[in-house]
Amino acid sequence: NAGVTQTPKFQVLKTGQSMTLQCAQDMNHNSMYWYRQDPGMGLRLIYYSASEGTTDKGEVPNGYNVSRLNKREFSLRLESAAPSQTSVYFCASSDRAQMGPLHFGNGTRLTVT
Amino acid sequence: AQSVSQHNHHVILSEAASLELGCNYSYGGTVNLFWYVQYPGQHLQLLLKYFSGDPLVKGIKGFEAEFIKSKFSFNLRKPSVQWSDTAEYFCAVNVNRDDKIIFGKGTRLHILP
């Protein structure tokens, strides 16, 4: 049982480049999330999706877009990367209907130079 | 907008000392509350959660938390810490009818052997 799988694990981008972070879960969860973690800032919610076909902005959505492709997959796109987007990104999912906890992926460490 | 405040950014204790980490949230309605722990190099995992019922919640590894609605607080406690409790601890809040889950900035706990 893989849980939440994120790819890639590491990425280095130059300012202005674009990339998509992939996330997939195999737990049949309805809710999926993207967070970024920065030292001293905790986890900040970028976007979330309560169900297939719906997405909502979190605390820090600027500079990001998301796609809930199907129930399993929730991708995060940086259209024009900036150094301020250097961070560790975590995807998570939960079974909100069953009041389940967040299950996190292993994270993507992104550096923008 | 909902928010979470964790008062202690960095706590240093000796083994066997008692622990209390503060967490306050801002939202007047029904909330669900969580404590997560992140051990070095790992992703977050759930310690305990409160949805309803008994405001004193017991979690894994001897941790507990008390929900005090009048104080908008959900403090984490452990009577006697161990060196292996060295980690970062995050409080999180979710408004009952929404899927959005917001985290505090975290408390870094360092236990001296």
Image (cartoon, coloured by chain):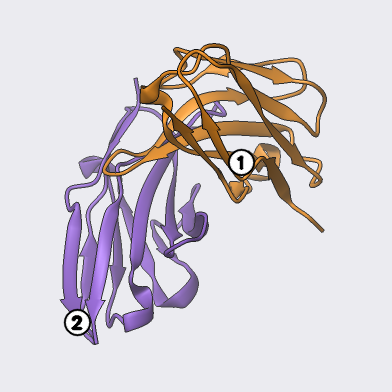
* Foreground pick, B26 / A88: A88
Check the picture and name the quadrant holding the C terminus of chain A. top left
> Which-is-in-front pick, marks 2 and 1?
1
* Foreground pick, A31 / A84: A84
Q: Residue at x 59, y 32 (%)?
A: A33
Where in the figure is residue A16, as x and y percent of width and height?
49, 13
Q: Disc 1 residue type?
A: Ala
Q: Disc 2 residue type?
A: Ala
Q: Are marks 2 and 1 in contact (CB under 8 Å)?
A: no
Seen in the picture, residue B76 relative to B83 is either above or below; the reply is: above
Local crowd size for mark 2, using a 10 Å CA cut-off: few (<14), some (14–19), many (≥20): few
Q: Residue at x 21, y 43 (%)?
A: B71
Mark 2, residue position: B17
Circle 2 chain: B
Q: Residue at x 17, y 53 (%)?
A: B8
* Foreground pick, B97 / B108: B108
Q: Secondary structure at mark 2?
A: loop
Where in the figure is residue A96, as x and y percent of width and height?
65, 38
Q: Secondary structure at mark 1?
A: strand
How far apart marks 2 and 1 lie (CA) works out to 33 Å
Which chain does the orange colour mark? A
Mark 1, residue position: A92
Where in the figure is residue B62, as x and y percent of width and height?
41, 77
Where in the figure is residue A17, as x and y percent of width and height?
55, 16
Which chain does the purple colour mark? B
Q: Residue at x 31, y 30 (%)?
A: B3
